Image: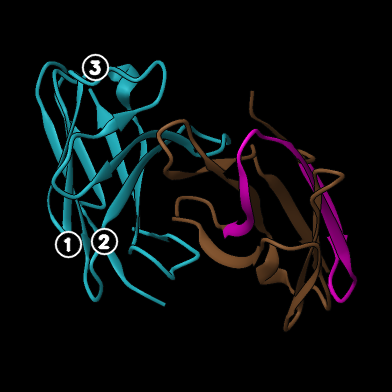
Chain colours: A cyan, B brown
Amino acid sequence: GAVVSQHPSWVICKSGTSVKIECRSLDFQATTMFWYRQFPKQSLMLMATSNEGSKATYEQGVEKDKFLINHASLTLSTLTVTSAHPEDSSFYICSAKSHGTATEAFFGQGTRLTVV
Amino acid sequence: GQNIDQPTEMTATEGAIVQINCTYQTSGFNGLFWYQQHAGEAPTFLSYNVLDGLEEKGRFSSFLSRSKGYSYLLLKELQMKDSASYLCAVRDRGAGGYNKLIFGAGTRLAVHP
């Protein structure tokens, strides 16, 4: 299957700082990328959907000014957690799919964010 | 609204067969996926159903009934490495016309010797 690379795998940051997470599709053009958050022993909760070159569509309850998403190219999307707080500590996962025939989205490895 | 239900936990014996059920309610159904997820890792794709019936892939099979809003994942010849969470996800066509995956809470399967 296609490869999606997410970086970093884990990050620890101080409260009030911002953290950027990158999601790259390595061998295909990702017209759409999805960002999820997963708390321990819970399922993936979709945060937002981003299409290349346009603004992200956020799910209800997700603050777009806190979770900044940029999808500037067909192979890269970034999620920036601004003014991070301990309650933002979670596992963040991206997935990417190409336009047209692809039936599945491919997931990155995930990023474990810990805010102290 | 959207709702996906699956059992929280299941246990099974090595070598046996286990069936994990999933029921869903969604307004814009456009396919159902099953993913496997080990703790601390990203989900990996197992199967995809968009039409009614059974899809078989090696030790894994997935069934879909759209009229009943029901799917199951069947795992045969269980191995210890199959201990993981299994996520049922429905692809839903949202109000904006684009597809998104809605995940169930996952079923944690424990395989015992």
Secondary structure mostly seen in the magenta stretch: strand
Q: Is residue A58 magenta?
A: no
**For marks 2 and 3 on the same chain, the one whose residue lies earlier in the sequence:** 2
- The label on residue A75 is 1
Q: Could you tell whether B57 is left or right of A16 in the image?
A: right
Dots 2 and 3: beta carbons under 8 Å? no
Q: Position of residue B53 (x, y in %)?
A: 83, 67
Residue depicted at 57% across the width and 34% down the height: A42
- The label on residue A104 is none
Q: Quadrant of residue B104?
A: top right
**For marks 3 and 1 on the same chain, the one whose residue lies earlier in the sequence:** 1
Marked residue chain, label 2: A
The residue to which callout 2 is attached is A30
Q: Quadrant of residue A27?
A: bottom left
Residue range highlighted in magenta:
B9-36
Q: Position of residue A93 (x, y in %)?
A: 36, 46
Q: Position of residue A10 (x, y in %)?
A: 25, 46
Q: Quadrant of residue B110?
A: bottom right
Under circle 1, the secondary element is: loop
Marked residue chain, label 1: A
Circle 1: residue type: Thr
Crowdedness near tag 3: few (<14), some (14–19) or many (≥20) residues, C-alpha within 10 Å: some
Q: Looking at the image, which is closer to me, A56 or B47?
A: A56
Give a yes or no on whether discs 3 and 1 share a subunit: yes
CA distance separating discs 3 and 1 = 29 Å
CA distance separating discs 2 and 1 = 6 Å
Quarter of the figure that contains the C terminus of chain A:
top left
Residue depicted at 34% across the width and 63% down the height: A99
Under circle 2, the secondary element is: loop
Mark 2 or 3, which is nearer the eye?
2
Circle 3: residue type: His
Q: Looking at the image, which is closer to me, B57 or B7?
A: B57
